[in-house]
Image (tube, helix red, strand yellow):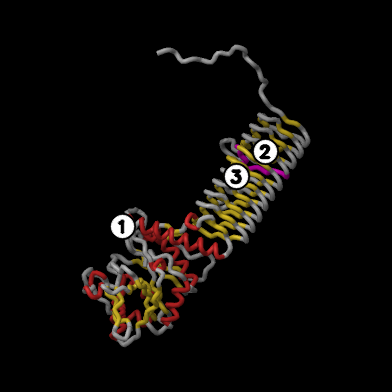
Amino acid sequence: MAAGKGTRMRSNKPKVLHRLGGRALAQHVIDTAVRLSARSVVVITGHEAERVEAGLAAPAGCATALRYVRQEPQLGTGHAVQQAAPLLPDDGVTLVLSGDVPLTRVETLQALLDLCAGEYLALLTLEMTDPTGYGRIVRSADGSVQAIVEQKDASEAQKAITEIYSGIMAVPTRLLRGWLARLDNRNAQNEYYLTDVVKSAVADGQGVKAHRIHDAIQVAGVNSPLQLAELERAHQRRQAESFMEQGVRLADPARFDLRGELVCGQDVEIDVNCVFEGRVLLGQGVRIGANCVIANAQIDDGAVIHPFTHIDGEKLGVRVGADALIGPFARLRPGAQLGPEVHIGNFVEVKNSTLAAGAKANHLAYLGDATVGERVNYGAGSITANYDGANKHRTVIEADVHVGSNSVLVAPVTIGAGGTVGAGSVITKDAPAGALSVSRGKPFTVPDWKRPAKKAG
């Protein structure tokens, strides 16, 4: 269910599109359903339906069909599911999930489906110290579930109940269809409550079962920016603990952010305040320094990423070779492909360039659209001038070249193997292998030079 407005978010963005761990809230729910091997996922939209539908997708390569129905106007949870009913096959089980409850575990939902067994109405419930605002589970003397009573319709005795309904149920579709037809809106909100199907099930003598859990995070919803931030930290802590169980060393699990997919080899170390986005692969023995942001990159065995480094491969990707040293304060942009033992130092930017084994650019430099050979030493303050105002051009720096500090290589240009570029040169023509290339203005000195002075007053 993803039809609500989310007024308390105080945002122009539909609530279910707000992001948790780098994905929309409702995308988490869809991905979980896919992992349960659902035949189809039906998303019920309403408020900003077109934006919501455009912002969600089935995971690439999955066999689950993703379909949408619209609830207009929004007349309650029962009314929402009524809109989806025509798309639900009678031979299946309907699992009802909320688009703003993103962290329910697959194994929890599988246990609920097993309890349903295609025969029973099965509810996911939670014991809470403070159940305010939630529908209460009303049981008979023998412990069987008799009803769910919403907070606004509950008596004082019912408000004292601490077992609450999570909003998640599994029910045989053939039974659900009839119970939906019997819903009415005779309640304090004048809405059609999905929870009223429990009354119908009890009246029909159909068993109602409950799977009770104790992990509130699994059924926590998002209704405000504060709740979203709290759930984000809980989600990140869960991910951090999972990585530490696999052997990853996190300096502080409370200061770790994964907003995509992270795959780690053995003996990976990650310092504080690091953010990982997109798909990131870390090889064995990789060390990530504090305050790094890394997205869409592969970092091979033994590489060290020093603090405050920014790596973002976007669609082209970035690769850092084995035993490379990157940073601090380095920036690797899309298409940066670095070989083994490459050194990229402080305030060096690399974009759409390949650096072969052992190449070094240690200080204050730019390499854009360049092919750099083995063991090249690229001096501080040097740049490839790769853009002529209309088109990008490539610079080729062959093996064992030394580029002196504060040089400009104006592409397209090739510096032959073993060549040297004198410091402060502007190179506009190809340089032969083994040559010294120097291009500077003639130096001169003006003795007793007086700098201009400000006029008085």
Q: Residues within 10 Å of mark 2 (few under 14, many from 20)?
A: many
Q: 363 or 251: nearer the eye?
A: 251
Pointer 1 residue: 8
**Measuring 40% from the left and 72% from the top, which residue is drawn there?**
214
Q: What's under tag 2, amino acid-wise? A: Tyr
What's the distance in space between the residues labelled 3 and 1, CA to CA?
A: 42 Å
Q: Which element is circle 1 on?
A: helix
Give the main secondary structure of the magenta stretch: strand
The mark lying in front, picked from 2 and 3, is 3
In the image, is residue 431 above or below residue 359? above
Quadrant where the C terminus is found in the figure: top left
In the image: residue 339, left or right of residue 57: right
In the image, is residue 380 above or below residue 266? above
Q: Which of the labelled discs sits on residue 283, or is there none?
A: none
Q: What's under tag 1, amino acid-wise? A: Arg
Mark 1 or mark 2, which has the lower sequence index? 1
What's the distance in space between the residues labelled 2 and 3, CA to CA?
A: 15 Å
Can you give x and y, in whole percent of width and height, for residue 117 in the image? 43, 83
Pointer 3 residue: 327
Q: Is residue 369 magenta?
A: yes
Mark 3 or mark 1, which has the lower sequence index? 1
Q: Residues within 10 Å of mark 3 (few under 14, many from 20)?
A: many
Can you give x and y, in whole percent of width and height, for residue 76 in the image? 29, 69
In the image: residue 80, left or right of residue 235: left
Q: Is residue 208 magenta?
A: no
In the image, is residue 207 above or below residue 101? below
Can you give x and y, in whole percent of width and height, for residue 100 in the image? 38, 64
Which image quadrant is residue 228 in?
Answer: bottom left
Quadrant where the N terminus is found in the figure: bottom left
In the image, is residue 214 above or below residue 8? below
The residues colored magenta run 364-374
